[in-house]
Amino acid sequence: MSQFHTGGLRARRCQPSQRLAAVVVPALVLMALATPAHAQLGRLKKMGSDAIKDAAKDKLSTDKKDAAKPATATAASAATPAAASKPKSAGMPVLDDDRIALVLASLGPMVKEAQVRADAAVASRAYVEKKKISDACVQQASKNVNPMAMAAAAQKNSARITALQNQTEPIQRRLNKAVADNNLRSQLYLQDSLSVLSMRTASLSMGTNCIFEFAPPVMLEARLLEMQGSSSNGDGGTFDPGEATRSTISRYEFGVLRERIALWALLQENPALKGLGKEGVFTEEEQAALAIHAAEIKKLTPLFKSDAMIWKAWSDLRDW
């Protein structure tokens, strides 16, 4: 269990089983339909993903119409106005050894974030399947509520219920402090903990064996990245490639160079890719420069393919 999850047990007297039985069923049904923490996070997640989807177009489409579009309609130029503003005098940014090395070096923090997203995607598949079973279990239990049996179950499981309640109270206090401090990471972990503990308490009170598990930490870290990205102000994002990059190339150049490196990586795996636009056409000199960094670029290919690495648009980049 993560350090942000449950902790700090304190003793508390058990509530009378009859009173508990009277309040658990409504709470159980409400939580089964929409857990507040997950509902809130879902909305925040949608905000972040919608912003990226609105900013990007799929450059890898094999549709002939997409292939016939001019370069100005590529994914890079589909970003927000400030992100996609191309200097009138700017041509296609050229990939040479120095620029490739500069862009790859600046992608270090982004690679770590992309790996978090990729790991979260894997972890979420197993978690979602288990959650479906849990949700179905609690929904079925809520349809067959027997007040007498529930009161008996609450009495039988009173010690376990009290232990869960003793965990819930300090977590709620920690969550209140996290909200006051605007600590998003702690909020995510503590909200998940409260949700799970509440459902476990309700399950014991009804005498069911429904199983509720905490979200994998990597999923919460991925949600944190999305929340942080969606909270940025203005047209620019939050990713900073570093002073060395910002003082050498423009935001426009960085965006196009990153995009072209990604396209070259994908072409190495599938030379038959179509509809890549001018960004996907490389001179002999560029091919030679990219080949020098082929091993490093190859490591990024799975992240480019899965879209865990942002490269089709520039909504993630800060202004400079």
Image (cartoon, helix red, strand yellow):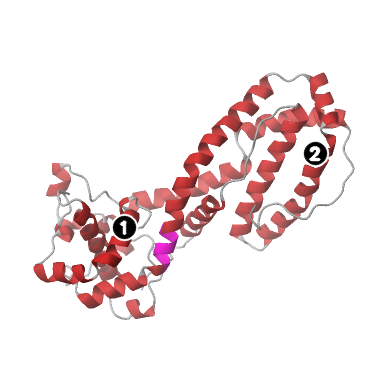
- Is residue 224 toward the left or the right of residue 270 in the image? right
Would residue 134 be counted in the magenta stretch? no
- C-alpha distance separating marks 2 and 1: 51 Å
| Residue at image location 42% in from the left, 67% down from the top | 109
Tag shown at residue 313: 1
| Residue at image location 59% in from the left, 27% down from the top | 136
- SS category of the residue bearing label 1: loop
Span colored in magenta: 109-114
Q: Position of residue 89 (x, y in %)?
A: 16, 72
Q: Position of residue 42 (x, y in %)?
A: 52, 44
| Residue at image location 62% in from the left, 61% down from the top | 183
Q: Tell me if residue 21 comes above or below residue 192 in the rendering.
A: above
- SS category of the residue bearing label 2: helix
Q: Nearer the viewer, mark 2 or mark 1?
A: 2
| Residue at image location 80% in from the left, 39% down from the top | 160
Residue behind mark 2: 160
Question: Tag 2: residue type?
Answer: Arg
Q: Position of residue 62 (x, y in %)?
A: 18, 43
Residue 53 is at least partly visible in this image: yes
Q: Classify 10 Å Cα crowding around label 1: few (below 14), some (14-19), many (20 and above).
A: many
Location of residue 25 (image quadrant): top right
Of all residues, the one furthest to the left in this rendering is 284
Q: Between disc 2 and disc 1, whose residue precedes?
A: 2
- Is residue 320 toward the left or the right of residue 95 in the image? right
